[in-house]
């Protein structure tokens, strides 16, 4: 099982515990008591926060005791969705904050969507970089690399790769000439990395 599939499975198991917790006397009221309306219309969680910025609440002890291998806490916004629908969230789906307020538990501000949709809607440097279609160095088009996969997409700029390869080849030739070696001998001795080749050339020039 992949890491992503494992994460979705754990989330599903946690949702099943949330569904049981909802029927536990006083648990939802305890959650409701920690929600505060904001001027934007959000219901903001005032309790414990997850490192990622989301609100979290402890599961009832009677339920937590059965949570083997699953978190004994629940994300407040997922609780809100499950409580409003009476059903667990479909495996592989996530809850998107339409208001972009991670502490919000207002049902009308939440939408169950695919992980991909949630990612596309989000805003982060990683996402912005992944969505680029042109090279930040030369402005040329980015193309998927040969070792790219759907879960680990990698893109390269052929123009920059070509320029880098030509510059490295020229550096190898310089090192080979400086040490009286053939091109292949220079690579065998100093490698093809720019840092190692540059250091070898600087040492030779300084001697």
Image (cartoon, rainbow, N blue to C red):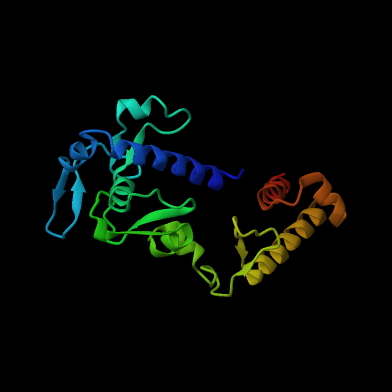
Q: Which quarter of the rendering shows the N terminus?
A: top right
The percent coordinates of residue 131 (x first, y second) are: 49, 67
Q: Which quarter of the rendering shows the C terminus?
A: top right
Q: 5 or 191, which is in the foreground?
A: 5
User: Which of the 4 image quadrants contains residue 35?
Assistant: top left
110 lies left or right of 207: left
The percent coordinates of residue 81 (x first, y second) are: 31, 52
Q: 33 or 138, which is in the foreground?
A: 33
Q: Residue furthest bottom?
A: 140
77 lies left or right of 166: left
The percent coordinates of residue 45 (x first, y second) are: 21, 45
Question: Number of marks in the image?
Answer: 0
* Image vertical order of residue 83 relative to residue 118, above or below: above
The percent coordinates of residue 94 (x first, y second) are: 41, 53
Q: Residue at x 83, y 47 (%)?
A: 188
Q: 111 or 196, which is in the foreground?
A: 111
Q: Residue at x 65, y 58 (%)?
A: 149
User: Which of the 4 image quadrants contains residue 30?
Assistant: top left
* Image vertical order of residue 16 relative to residue 141, above or below: above
Q: Residue at x 72, y 66 (%)?
A: 166
Q: Residue at x 36, y 28 (%)?
A: 64
39 lies left or right of 13: left
Q: 192 or 51, which is in the foreground?
A: 51
129 lies left or right of 48: right
């Amino acid at each position: 099982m992949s890491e992503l599939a494992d994460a979705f499975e754990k989330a599903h198991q946690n949702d099943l515990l949330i569904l049981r917790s909802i029927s536990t006397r006083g648990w939802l009221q305890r959650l409701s008591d920690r929600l505060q309306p904001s001027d934007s219309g959000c219901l903001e969680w005032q309790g414990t926060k997850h490192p990622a910025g989301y609100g979290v609440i402890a599961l009832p002890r009677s339920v937590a005791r059965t949570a083997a291998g699953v978190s004994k806490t629940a994300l407040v916004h997922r609780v809100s969705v499950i409580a409003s629908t009476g059903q667990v969230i479909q495996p592989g789906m996530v809850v998107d904050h339409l208001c972009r307020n991670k502490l919000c538990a207002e049902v009308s501000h939440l939408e169950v969507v695919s992980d991909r949709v949630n990612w596309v809607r989000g805003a982060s440097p990683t996402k912005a970089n992944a969505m680029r279609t042109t090279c930040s160095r030369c402005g040329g088009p980015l193309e998927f690399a040969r070792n790219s996969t759907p879960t680990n997409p990698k893109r390269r700029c052929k123009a920059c790769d070509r320029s880098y390869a030509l510059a490295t080849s020229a550096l190898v030739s310089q090192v080979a000439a400086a040490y009286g070696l053939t091109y292949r001998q220079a690579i065998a001795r100093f490698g093809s990395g720019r840092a190692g080749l540059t250091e070898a050339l600087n040492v030779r020039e300084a001697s």
